[in-house]
Image (cartoon, coloured by chain):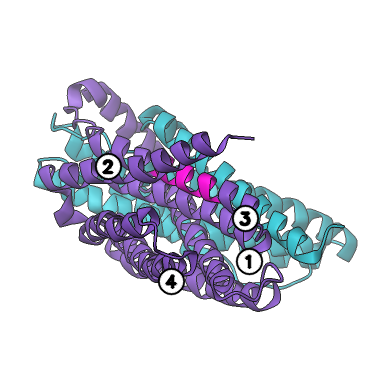
Chain colours: A purple, B cyan
Amino acid sequence: MLSPNWHRALSLFLLISPHVLLGVLAVILYKRRLYREFPCFFAYVLYEIVKFIPLFALYSVQGVTGKEYAYAYCVTLLISIVLRFGVIDEISRNLFRESRFLKVAARRSLQCVTGLLLGVGALLTVYAPGGNSATWYAGIFVVNRGAAMVQSGLLLALLLFSRFLGLSWRRPAFGIALGLAVLTSLDLAMFALRAAFTSEAAADFVDLLITGTYLVCVSIWMGYSLAPEPEPIASPAVLPHDEVETWNRELQQLLKR
Amino acid sequence: MITQPIIGAWTFVAIAFFALGILVYVAIRSRTRRLDLEKAIQAFRSLDIEAFRNLVDSGEEAFLRESLSPKKFREIKRQRAWAALIYAWEAGRAAAALAKIGQAAQRSPDPEIAASGVQVAENAFRLRLQTLGACLHLLTEVVLPDLRGPSLPPLVDQYERTAETLFRLGRFSSRGQGLARPKSA
């Protein structure tokens, strides 16, 4: 078991470091002009930084009660959930933008998946409400758990669908999708535990895991936004003339069969 | 004592980690996967369109139904449907590879190759989705061989259209213009 000092130090590190990295990420997104391509994600990053300042102030100030902090936390959490849905929509638009056919067909399939996941999420919220605690913030954790399930399901569907179709991702889009998918998947697990185990010790431990997960996800976003896109290689190296001729011959034979 | 909410919570944890496992797999595969023209050619070579057409031909099926005993017909129908299913599955895999090639061509500085790339990718996406429908259809035939279903001409047509555009793309590329490597994650 961690001593109170170590626990506080670790909590502070896990609270502050992702938001410092988010600041760096915002600068990278701005400098590489990725905010034009992903405005919703850029807004989400800025919002996460801005929301941290009052929350951290409330966390640090002595006179603020746990209930007051919980109110503020839950309101900001609900806005984050809405913004994440916006980011997912933005990623799917970006992924299908080059194909007229997929813009219609794939987005329709995704809408079906969304409907299905929303239905399952609503059912689970009603029939698996988590712990026996009647506190309102336990209810918020259940709502976030449902949202995390819908969001991770959508992102998973998007990743699997693109793999099935042979769609090529751009690096930043893939990074955003992967980071958000990891975040929402682990949110699903953590908030399910948070709703079920309401003791102070369990809550402290799960909170540490939630902030630790956030640090991992921000690192994924940073890594993919810094990674350069592979340069297009001219044909002689990748697609030599004789290889193209072989390709032609193969296809001619196939068509004549 | 383990209560119901706690079992529920651990179920969510299990679902989350299952999703996470798939994510890690997809991420690793996406990094190691590269555009392989040779494989795409081999995939195309392995597909005999006439054999597939013969396997799903409704006239051929009607002839077999008349000539064979019901038991023998069911056995043969299952085998034919299974073989056609494997063809459709492989065609789908080839279509996914073609989609990648098409998207790479789409980024070519040559407008002619880029336009062809768009066509290849679009046809490949269509073919990929159609093969999914065809596989389900053929799986139904494997399970229920007596069921009289429609033939599969759209899949064959789609395959031929894709092959034709791919052939055109190959002809454009052979002029020495560049195909870009796809910007995979």
Q: Is residue B59 above or below residue A60?
A: below
Would residue A160 appear left or right of B169 to someone viewing this image? right
* Along the viewing direction, whichever of A59 and A179 lies nearer the viewer: A59
Q: What range is drawn magenta here?
A: A207-217
Dot 2 falls on a residue whose secondary structure is helix
Residue B65 location (% of width, % of height): 78, 66
Residue at mark 1: chain = B
| Residue A135, magenta (yes or no) | no
Please give the residue where the numbered disc 1 appears in the rendered image. B58
Mark 3 and mark 1: Cα distance apart in space:
69 Å
Return the residue at label 3.
A200
Location of the C terminus of chain B by quadrant is top left
Asked if badge 2 and badge 1 are on a common chain, one would say: no
Q: Earlier in the sequence, mark 2 or mark 4?
A: 2
Give the SS element for disc 4.
Answer: helix
As measured in the structure, the alpha-carbon distance from the residue carrying label 3 to the one carrying label 2 is: 28 Å
Label number found at residue A71: 4
The kind of residue on which mark 2 rests is Val
Q: Nearer the viewer, residue B22 or A244?
A: B22
Report the magenta stretch's main SS. Answer: helix
Tag in front: 2 or 4: 4
The picture quadrant where one finds residue B173 is top left
Q: Secondary structure at mark 3?
A: helix
What's the residue at 53%, 74% (across, down)? A118
